[in-house]
Image (spheres, rainbow, N blue to C red):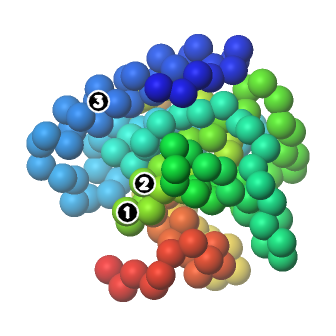
Amino acid sequence: MDTLTAAAPQAQTLLQQVQQRAAGTAAGAARTTPAAHGEYLTFRLGAEEYGIDILRVQEIRSYEAPTRIANAPSFLKGVVNLRGVIVPIIDLRLKLCCESAEYNHFTVVIVLNVHGRVVGAVVDSVSDVLELPGDAIRPAPATNASIDTSFILGIGSVNERMLILMDIEALMSAPDMGLMDSYGA
């Protein structure tokens, strides 16, 4: 297992939880309702907290500067070599227009498996793994056509916390990302 930086003992613990829970969930039937009850890895982008399906998470790594790709959009930070696999690194803070994108010892890369492709997502920090019952998830708010919310599954409520639940496959498969071939389904 890759070592994580000093800020990453929490990430290491979360990674172990993710792997254990993903193994248990994968043994059962696959979820067909994206925003139904489930387990979500939570992370921060600026002041907001987000959640993604833990079954998409392969590992959590400390941030290391990737090799830049010429003429790439600003949110595509570059690529890293992850045990022989070239992995594109997307800064979700830049992709989702967060006010700042500071790289510090809390910054991590969530390595994802999206449509069979390995992709890294830079986030400010990881929080925890939460199991959300179906009644804790509300539909995504309706917005005007100029705001793309197609990657938002819903809003999760846990005590006083509000989580924006993301369909990370939809986000990473979007045409403007340039990472995936077109997927019709």
The quarter of the picture where the C terminus appears is bottom left
Residue visible at 56% across and 45% down in the picture: 82
Which residue position holds label 1? 116
Query: Which mark is nearer the camera, 3 or 1?
Result: 1
Image: 89 above or below 21: below
Most extreme residue toward the front is 84
* Left or right placement of residue 121 versus residue 183 in this view: right
Residue visible at 77% across and 55% down in the picture: 67
Query: Which element carries disc 1, helix, strand or loop?
Result: loop
Query: Which element carries disc 3, helix, strand or loop?
Result: helix
Circles 2 and 3, Cβ within 8 Å, touching? The answer is no
Give me the C-alpha separation between circle 2 and circle 3: 16 Å
Which residue position holds label 2? 113
Residue visible at 82% across and 29% down in the picture: 104
The quarter holding residue 46 reads top right
Which residue position holds label 3? 21
